[in-house]
Image: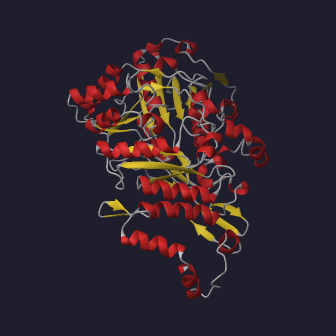
Amino acid sequence: MTPCRIVSAFSMSALGGRSTRKTALLINPPVYDTQYWAEWSQPYGLLRIAALLEKDNYKKLWLYDFMEAGEDRKVRNHRINPHETYEEKNWPDKKIVPIVIRKSAESLELYKRHFGKTWDHFEEWLRRRGLTRNNPPSEIWISSVMTYWWESTRDLTIRLRRYYGKRAKIILGGIYPTLAPEHAARMTEADIVVAGEVAEANDLWTDLSLYHRKPSYAIITPSRGCPYDCSYCAQKTINSGLTKVRFRNSADVVAEMRQKYEKYGIRDFAFYADFLLITFKYNVIPILKQIIDQKLPFRLYAPEGLDTRYLCQSQELLDLMKAAHFQKIYLPVESIDDEYIRTLNRRHVKLEHFVKAAKMCEKAGFELRNLDVNAFVLYGLPKESIDRVVKTTLFVSDVVGSIIPMLFTPVPSTSIFAEYLPYFREREWDKDLQFLNGKLYPFLGINEGSISDYIDLQRLMFTLNAHYRNESFRLFGDTRVSIALRENVRNGFEAFVRLHHGETANAPLTQEGSSSKRTADLRL
């Protein structure tokens, strides 16, 4: 590994050299994971860096986005082995084996995949553009996102070092190097690890011109920062320790959206911000009013969710969101237990805010029970109660009718990560960050739930989401069917069902009786 410099207050002047003579290759790495959702995954930080380099008059820029989706907004993928590196080889050379998660007598097999364009395609792309060892770019800028995706970043940087030696300077930025800079410096071949913001690029418009195929959507960042410090969130570290929210001028935000519509035909825009609704009267509402007044044919989204405490403060805000063509509303609901929420340092949010926000969404014209209004349910947290997750799921389903399961991932630099660092170190997960992926149930060993319990939680959420004639079933509704279902669950009908299966009618259906005493061979 080459010596690496960690920079927390990055400035372009630190790179040296005349920009008009420099070339730069910008890369968004592939993803190694068991599942991947490609929607709204545009590397907007890297695209702002592209705008910064254009502003500095770089001689030539290239963009290679491994995760660029096809017209169907999906990315290709293939299985890989969980413990192999792909620093030199492009494909697994052994029989593919799964990741096996175990607890008691149960096991769960999950297959790891390379999501995105292949290494073969990347090498051919470099050759076609003449980016050879004898003609390297001056700089290579890499944006790395999730800390548990770090392996593909390692493989990419080592490949690039092998291709170009020391003739190209590798600059690594993004969420992973910001949250785990020492890890990134130790595990990758970057020359510079940027731990924090590139302030010079913060307010620039993303540059989409480097894509060969015009993107079908764009990500817009109207603000940065959050005044709160929830125990599972790393926004404070990402924002260089600042809690003050910094805003872009609303006219500038709308001008960027308009430019992308007029130049690329983009109508779908996703707002990404640490806390979108803070002081919404002076920031979000002016954006919405300009879109409405200018009759811009946009479709708007906020896929990270909208804080319910602030959303429920203004019917005008929701009415304007509907008039400006917000397509869907996403509401975070970590739990229905306010006391538990306070243990996550989310003292500003209460269950009543979620209920009130949902009613106001419906009043604004967003339909409940048909995917217009969705709620994130977070589960897989350390030492959580399965019963509490079930209650939260049932409650959320009754209120809005659409649940988005969110498996919890412990993130470096957060207080939850610090609290359980001894647990991670015992398993060497402080080094092997890929095992902190929520999809691998990192807290399964200390939680009360079995593997079957956690799979059943997801089954329950998906079952409650099922639609027929544009609505999901309301378990606590007032139809005869809803009433009969509840009464049969309460009145001992379970005994009849269990007798049918040859079980003792009065035997309690406990976790031990249903899960841990039988071996489950589950494959996903």
The image shows residue 380 at horizontal and vertical percentages of: 62, 52
**Lateral position of residue 406 relative to residue 249, left or right:** right
- Residue lying at 64% horizontally and 74% vertically, measured from the top left: 509
**Residue 337 versus residue 524 in the image, above or below:** above
* Closer-to-camera residue (255/198): 255
- Position of the N terminus, as image quadrant, is top right
**Residue 335 versus residue 235 in the image, above or below:** below
**Lateral position of residue 48 relative to residue 171, left or right:** left
- Residue lying at 73% horizontally and 54% vertically, measured from the top left: 446
Q: Is residue 95 visible?
A: no
**Lateral position of residue 282 relative to residue 12, left or right:** left
The image shows residue 400 at horizontal and vertical percentages of: 41, 52
* Closer-to-camera residue (16/200): 200
- Residue lying at 57% horizontally and 33% vertically, measured from the top left: 175
The image shows residue 313 at horizontal and vertical percentages of: 41, 33
Quadrant housing residue 241 = top right
The image shows residue 63 at horizontal and vertical percentages of: 43, 32
- Residue lying at 41% horizontally and 22% vertically, measured from the top left: 51
Quadrant housing residue 180 = top right
- Position of the C terminus, as image quadrant, is bottom right
